[in-house]
Amino acid sequence: MHFFLLCCVFLWAMLPQSDMHTAVPATVLDCCEGDILLLLDSSGSVALYEFSHLLRFTADLLRPFSLGRGHVKVGLLQVGTSAKLVFDLNAHDSQESLQKALQHVRHLQGDTNTVAALKVAQRLLAETEESLPQILLWLTDGAQPGSVVEPMTELKERGVSVLIVSTVHGNYQVLQRAVTPPLESHLYSVDIDNIDIITEELRNAIIKILRTERLHVVHLTSHSAVLQWRPILTADRGYYELWYNSMLNTDPETRRTISGNSSRVELTNLQPDTTYTASLRPQSNQTLFDTLSVTFTTLPEVLSPAVVSVSDSSPHQIRVSWGPLQPARVQRYTVEYGAIPSGQVRTVTFHSQKNSTLLTGLDQGTQYLVTVSALHVDGKERAMSVRACTQEAAPPALADLQLTPVQPQEVQVAWKAHQEGLKGYWLKWERKNSKAPFVSSVYLSPSSHSMRLTHLSPGSQVCVSPVYSSGLGDGLCCTALHTGYI
């Protein structure tokens, strides 16, 4: 009979994936958040029969949990002559992925070096988020556990809960010192053939550790707060009782009843820059739940406009933007702008949902003072001012450029330009010497309109650029293709 059972288990472990039972039932435990690191004894003292049963037991134990970020994360570390990390805590975010990975775990055999595996476990658990609960679940035959009490104690001092499942020939004295109290729900010594009888009890112990009965503030403003919690009830299993008030005790306590299928609520009409306490109690006829509490401070009062910015500047216009938009609290916005120091002030008015405008008809290269003010529904008025400069207009380009051949290697250059603000011209050309062409340049007065150039290289370029008080205008270039006869 024992031979038959051994063969059956061996076949289950060696079957290809397509022949194995891979159906994963719908997840039912969306109750928990934290880390479970499995420490699986895969040494030679654990028979293949026992090893296969431990794997199947682990798969069934974890099957109902929601996995991934914000839920339960599972890692697997095997104990053998050396530690083997099969997958880390971030490897699986679905039951299908986890169950397939467990099906492919193979027996290491070798020595039972649990102490070396615990060093790896300490490092893995230290790298995760410390605020979340952590569990080390040690699955072992308990034979020759080694000096595990000290590393287990270090884990427990860091807040890790150590749970142990051992087959009946384990060293109970060592195990009870290694486990996290209470022993009756965290330490199990069971015959491998009957290991399934502890599945539900061990799972409940894990749930008790990982159940995230916490109240979170997920969004906060100066007048509101959104609270969120992991679902504990359902619509037909009870309701939530919520109450909150400020720490100043100037306002009466507010109480609300919330449906059992809810997992978040928004608190409104709060005072800015004020500390509040909120409590949530799940009410059910079936189970007694703890009250969840949180303390938070609303943001300071923000009156629009709190920010005024300038963009899209050009010679005759600028865009002004402001915020934040507060249409429920603002009646209208007014924008006033005028050139500094004594320009005419112009005013435009906008509705409460407008947060930008394009100011046009401005003078180029001029500094303006722009003031945005908001009239609030309570009669308060807030204003903010910024300085903004329009850009200088681009200097005019050269109007015309002509090259006329005169003598061999000589041309007459003539040009035209806009005269307003003109300061002069830059003239550049290529000259020929005995070695190689080189570039010559000359600055000319604004009254100059032509010049004869000599010793030009064949095919050389001649360029003229106008110079204005506001900068260098775009020039024109011509190529001296024929410079008389060469």
Image (tube, grey):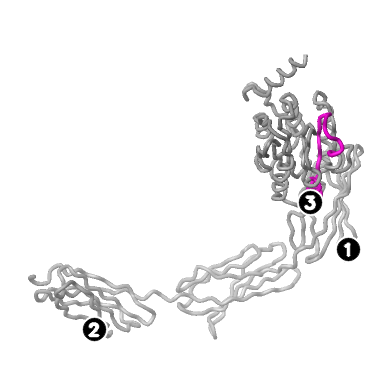
Report which quarter residue 174 is drawn in. top right
Start and end of the magenta stretch? Answer: 152-175
Q: Which residue is mark 1?
A: 251
In the picture, which quadrant includes the N terminus? Answer: top right
Q: Which residue is mark 3?
A: 158
Residue 237 image position (x, y, % from top left): 86, 37
| Earlier sequence position, callout 1 versus callout 2 | 1
Q: Amino acid at mark 2?
A: Ser
Q: Dot 2: within a 10 Å radius of its alpha carbon, few (fewer than 14), some, or many (20 or more) residues?
A: few
Q: Which residue is mark 2?
A: 448
Q: Dot 3: within a 10 Å radius of its alpha carbon, few (fewer than 14), some, or many (20 or more) residues?
A: some
Report which quarter residue 249 is drawn in. bottom right
Q: Is residue 313 above or below residue 6?
A: below
Mark-to-mark CA distance, 2 and 3 = 87 Å
Which of these two is toward me, 225 or 371?
Answer: 225
Task: Name the side, left or right, on which 98 lies relative to 399.
Answer: right
Task: Name the side, left or right, on which 86 lies relative to 365.
Answer: right
Q: Is residue 55 above or below residue 437?
A: above
Task: Name the side, left or right, on which 432 lies relative to 390.
Answer: left
Q: Amino acid at mark 1?
A: Asp
| Residue at the spot 72% in from the left edge and 26% down from the top edge | 52
